[in-house]
Amino acid sequence: MQFNTMLKTIPALLIGATLSSAALAADIKLGVAEALTGPAAKYGVAIKNGFTLASEEINAKGGVNGDKLALVIEDEQGKKEEAINVFKKLIFQDKVLAVFGPTLSNSAFAADPIANAAKVVVFGTSNTADGITAMGPFTFRNSVMEADVLPVTVKAAVKHFGIKKVAVIYGNDDAFTKSGYDVFKATLEQQKIPVTTTEAYAKGDVDFKAQLTKIKAGNPDAIVCSCLAEEAANIILQTRALGMKQPFIGGNGLNSPKLFEIAKDAGDNTLMGSPWSAENQTPANKAFIAAYKAKFGSDPDQFAAQAYDAMYIMADAIKSVKLTGNLAKDRDAVRAALPAVKIDGATGKFAFRAAPAVAGKQVGFDADQEAIVNIAKGGKFVLLK
């Protein structure tokens, strides 16, 4: 009788041992909420590729403390409402450890408060508008703020082109382009560059001739464009159609192959600030570019590079944490570990810096990274020398 009982018990023990082993090598679920369809997909697909490449590399090397990274990828379509829905699914239904995204600053202002309320790290890799990390202590980003990029870019443009006066055009109904305009405005005042005219457009506009005709009348030396890539490309093309040859100055929203797919060589002499350049010949960047081309059959861009680095930053943070299986504790442990992470990745040396406190309380963390100024030549961005 006792022997029979042992026979029944042994399989149970074996099953238990198997389950225990599986638990020790569990997947670490990370949410990825990016715009994979719609106009912002030109950024979101590259971001997803960067996350995918990095997580596969990390898993191929044994994962994080023996556990594999498992991405739960959702399409937030570049829309605020959909970003909210996707964040709720990832956090409350999928129970991910942390969330990457969303793609646009507009969507981040809508969805990030959900992550902060649920005490889940939300890590933006393409949100550069002011105020993103002021939303709470669980908000992180490795995308360099426009406030850090644009002053450097304007200064370089003034020196390179001998600029005395500029015109400005920007999208006034998008958090990223509006924030970029605010920084450009302050920068031009600080650097004492007169503005001949300031023109605005709405998201979805495709005809900019009315604004450009006013800009042409002021005869500026350059045109400052706080725009996303597709709009900027159409503005550049229509500027050339009016016989205008002024160079453009923009932020990292212009750092997309989409700019040249539409504008082609008409975009030459556009200056753009970014933390990443394909011409940066560091070993980490060369390895990233080669691996990306091998996997996806295309050149990477800044947004893929930032996502790639972000996954390694997250992996480093998780590596320093002893995951307990208590999701609330583990989520908070990741938040506590992230600020200390420093890496030398595809975008160069990276560290976090605490965002300015709000009402005396600690909020999130911004990227502490230098901007690189690039100039468009022959249908691509190269380092400005």
Image: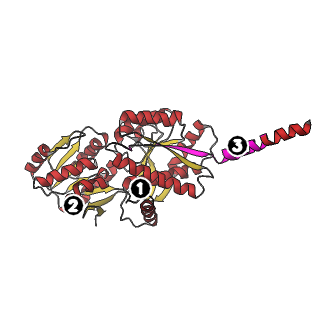
Work out whether residue 188 or residue 272 is closer to the camera in this orientation and state it. Answer: 272
Label 2 or label 3, whichever comes before in sequence order: 3
Q: Position of residue 89 (x, y in %)?
A: 48, 34
Q: Amino acid at mark 3?
A: Leu
- The residue positioned farthest toward the left in the image shown: 217
Q: Which residues are magenta?
A: 12-36
Magenta segment includes 70: no
**Mark 3 and mark 1: span between their CA atoms?**
37 Å
Label 1 or label 2, whichever comes before in sequence order: 2
Label 3 or label 1, whichever comes before in sequence order: 3
Q: Which residue is mark 1?
A: 305
**Mark 2 and mark 3: span between their CA atoms?**
59 Å
Work out whether residue 144 or residue 205 is closer to the camera in this orientation and state it. Answer: 205
Which quadrant would residue 158 be assigned to in this image?
A: bottom left
| Mark carried by residue 265 | 2
Q: Amino acid at mark 1?
A: Ala
Q: Please say whether residue 175 is visible from this viewpoint.
A: yes
Residue found at x 46% / y 50%: 352
Q: Which residue is mark 3?
A: 19
Which type of secondary structure does the marked residue at label 3 adopt?
helix
**Mark 1 and mark 2: span between their CA atoms?**
24 Å
Which type of secondary structure does the marked residue at label 1 adopt?
helix
The residue carrying pointer 1 sits among few (fewer than 14), some (14 to 19) or many (20 or more) residues within 10 Å by Cα, namely many
Q: Position of residue 143 (x, y in %)?
A: 39, 50
The residue carrying pointer 2 sits among few (fewer than 14), some (14 to 19) or many (20 or more) residues within 10 Å by Cα, namely some
| Mark carried by residue 1 | none
Quadrant where the N terminus sits is: top right
Residue found at x 43% / y 52%: 49
Work out whether residue 144 or residue 40 is closer to the camera in this orientation and state it. Answer: 40
